[in-house]
Amino acid sequence: MDMESWKLLRSICILSFLLGSCFVYQSLRVVDAQEDPKPAVTLQVDASNGAGRPIPETLFGIFFEEINHAGAGGLWAELVSNRGFEAGGQNIPSNIWPWSIVGDHSSIYVATDRSSCFERNKIALRMDVLCDSQGCPSGGVGVYNPGYWGMNIQEGKKYKVALYVRSIGDIDLSVSLTSSNGSRTLASEKITASASDVSKWTKKEVILEAKGTDPSARLQLTTTKKGSIWIDQVSAMPVDTYKGHGFRNDLFQMMVDIKPRFIRFPGGCFVEGEWLSNAFRWKETVGPWEERPGHFGDVWKYWTDDGLGHFEFFQLAEDIGAAPIWVFNNGISHNDEVETASIMPFVQEALDGIEFARGDANSTWGSVRAKMGRQEPFELKYVAIGNEDCGKTYYRGNYIVFYDAIKKAYPDIKIISNCDGSSHPLDHPADYYDFHIYTSASNLFSMYHQFDRTSRNGPKAFVSEYAVTGKDAGTGSLLASLGEAAFLIGLEKNSDVVEMASYAPLFVNTNDRRWNPDAIVFNSSHLYGTPSYWVQRFFAESSGATLLTSALKGNSSSLVASAISWKNNGKDYIRLKAVNFGATSVNMKVLVTGLDPNVMKVSGSKKTVLTSTNVMDENSFSQPEKVVPHESLLEMAEEDLTVVLPPHSFSSFDLLKESAKIKMPISDSSTHQKTTTL
């Protein structure tokens, strides 16, 4: 090979080496960029002492409305539906649904009459047994009640059955819990009595211990003794309810886990009624359960026996550890109104309701509470005058009369107006104004800024009903929950003017969906939380915490974020919350400033992420944890924290504030300096 050829070959080799090296270098740069990308956004958090703002103790709570059989057939653990036979109305004979007969019409005849011993609910059931022990079926004849789409009877659990009976002859009545078709007996006891013992209405009670499990069970009252028996006010309750106060344990625990600071009750539209004649009237819901007449809630179209009444709602609030907010009727329904000149009976009813809760045991209505077993008053600091009535003909006039009367009698009670004061001042006095919003996910996401420009003077805001509804929501989608999460972060950041917020509705029995979506879904035996329920759990520590000043820098149009500081078991934490409403992952660098580097530092604790593979994913009875938060350890470098926000996700990151390691110079005996770590 001549010299020129050698030089050419050497040049080609060198060029090839350089090109290859460049390719490898570029490849390594790509790999490195993928492994350690630059953050798309930066969240700057000021953790300086004194720089934060206290969040109201009351910020996040719950709203209970009797809708979707939330109480009757839900939280209230009574198993019998239409226990007093009043649901068919006062005309007789009336429909006794869902009661049905055991046997056939040749062996038994049933009808209602007005013979009850209870003045406020006169309807009773007369059962004429036409056969005797020789001609009746072996199991007897009678009536059964399937409860609210089945009674969840569990093996080993005890159930208290109480009923009132009357007869012109001896009785021999079997009280049984059976399978849905009556073919299998889970528990049974006899009630026997002579004619003289039951010639007048008499209360009988038995305790049944289940020998099997059936979520679709029913209660049966049967006999093989010929004659006539009257029965009324039949109740079946699990012995094991929350604190013995009548609340279904699993549903109650779902509420407790939200850590609500208040509970608004009993509605909603349930308080108004389509017509005033069917509105919730608290005086008819107190006293012994047997004497409560019950009523038809004509907005949501079902009968309630009002076992969950005025007293029980205050007990519920206390058991949860939440401040009660009582919503009462102000003389206005969906279709009729009481003129202001005639409103005083309604005002007196409200004052009496407050006295029932707060009055001493010697007061007129406080004594009624005392007779129900509660000597000491309940704590009541908030009342709402009506619901969604702003703009009705007599709303303002009625409201002023209520406001003046309540403030005169109870100056410390905070009063909530129906009218929205977020964009313009109210034309009447109030301590709070009510704000309701039901909209699409994108709209609610954008309402993160809703209260940014609201006046800081005047009454505070109570966002008592919010939710994503419509096609975005389905029956509880991830997409809906993300819009709600962003909205709540906005409320958190505006908590100097927004003092309370609650999702609506709270509960739905799947057998009677009157509204979609809802936070907690259940039937007789199972339950799960929708993604919207789990979003509320993210804010459990926010009430009473400190809001830290924070700002997102960079392309953050699909992101919202906040930062709070809070204490748990004597330790100080910073919690970051971020919603990624977009379809791509975002890398977020977190810069915490304001901590003295010689005294404090932050370290990773845990991260919690709510997301799923499809933005319309929902939970269900078959997949109750398809969309739930997942926790993991949060690792961070000594001086840096960069986190990944998955697409369509809600994430929180807990940072522990701890003492920093300080290196200080010291001298040894040879006068040479060393360092030590404190």
Image: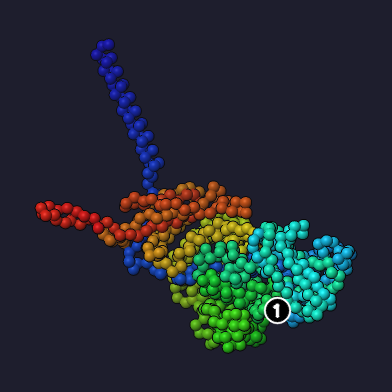
User: Is residue 386 visible to the viewer in this orientation of the structure?
Assistant: no
**What x and y, as percent, mark residue 382?**
53, 77
Dot 1: within a 10 Å radius of its alpha carbon, few (fewer than 14), some, or many (20 or more) residues?
Answer: some
Q: Residue furthest left?
A: 670
Q: Secondary structure at mark 1?
A: helix
Q: Residue furthest top?
A: 1
| Residue type for callout 1 | Glu
Quadrant housing residue 80: bottom right
Q: Nearer the viewer, residue 496 or 160?
A: 160
Q: At 50% from the left edge and 70% from the top edge, which residue is drawn?
A: 261
**What x and y, as percent, mark residue 406?**
55, 84
Name the side, left or right, on which 32 lies relative to 274. left
**What x and y, as percent, mark residue 282?**
64, 78
Vertical order, 193 against 42 (above or below): below
Q: At 59% from the left edge and 65% from the top edge, which residue is drawn?
A: 249
Q: At 37% from the left edge and 63% from the top edge, which residue is drawn?
A: 572
Name the side, left or right, on which 252 lies relative to 604. right
Name the side, left or right, on which 133 lies relative to 550. right
Q: Nearer the viewer, residue 508 or 423?
A: 508
Vertical order, 141 against 398 (above or below): above
The residue beneath circle 1 is 291
Q: At 48% from the left edge and 60% from the top edge, which residue is drawn?
A: 538
Q: Quadrant of the C terminus?
A: bottom left
Quadrant housing residue 230: bottom right
Total numbered badges shown on the rendered structure: 1
Q: Quadrant of the N terminus?
A: top left
